[in-house]
Amino acid sequence: TKAHQIQELKYYQEERSSPANQFAEEINMLNAKNAQDLEVAKQKFTKLQDEHDIERNFLLQTIEANMESHKSKLSDLNSDYESKLKIAYEQRDKLVDEYEQTKSDYKKRLEVILEDNKSALA
């Protein structure tokens, strides 16, 4: 009968749609899990990125501080070098002056001795 045929069709439709519905539910559950996993991954990535930015900024500040310290030390070394160089030049000039004076004194004494010798021989 017609009612029986309709009932059979409904039964077959339910049988066919049942696995399809089950499959659709599984897909929806997997999509929800993937969306949740993606959100967790995004949060982890954001956290790692924030930690990286903090570490990067710390390293940049450390490098900048070290560069300033290096500049200051270099300036101090240059200043110290210039000061010591000036002292060394002054000492050299003083020694040259003393040498010239000693040389002049010896030359005068030599002239006096030569005059004395000439007088003694004459």
Image: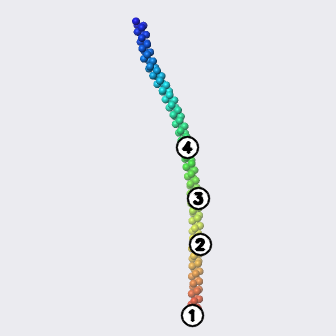
Residue 28: % across, % down: 48, 24
Q: Nearer the viewer, residue 110 or 32?
A: 32
For label 4, the SS is helix
Mark closer to the observer (4, 2): 4
Disc 2: which residue: 94
Badge 1 density bin: few <14, some 14–19, many ≥20, Cα 10 Å: few
> Earlier along the polypeptide chain: callout 4 or callout 3?
4
Disc 3: which residue: 76
For label 2, the SS is helix
- Residue 19 lies left or right of residue 122; in this view the side is left
What's the residue type where badge 4 is placed? Glu
Do the residues bearing badges 4 and 3 touch, measured as CB atoms within 8 Å? no
Disc 1: which residue: 122
- Give the CA distance from mark 4 to mark 3: 31 Å
Query: Residue at horizontal 55%, vertical 39%?
Result: 50
> Earlier along the polypeptide chain: callout 3 or callout 2?
3
Residue 49, above or below 3 = below
Residue 13, above or below 66 = above
The dot on residue 7 is none
Badge 3 density bin: few <14, some 14–19, many ≥20, Cα 10 Å: few
Mark closer to the observer (1, 4): 4
Mark closer to the observer (4, 3): 4
Q: Nearer the viewer, residue 21 or 97?
A: 21
What's the residue type where badge 3 is placed? Asp
Do the residues bearing badges 3 and 2 touch, measured as CB atoms within 8 Å? no
Disc 4: which residue: 55
Query: Residue at horizontal 54%, vertical 37%?
Result: 47
- Give the CA distance from mark 1 to mark 2: 42 Å
What's the residue type where badge 2 is placed? Lys
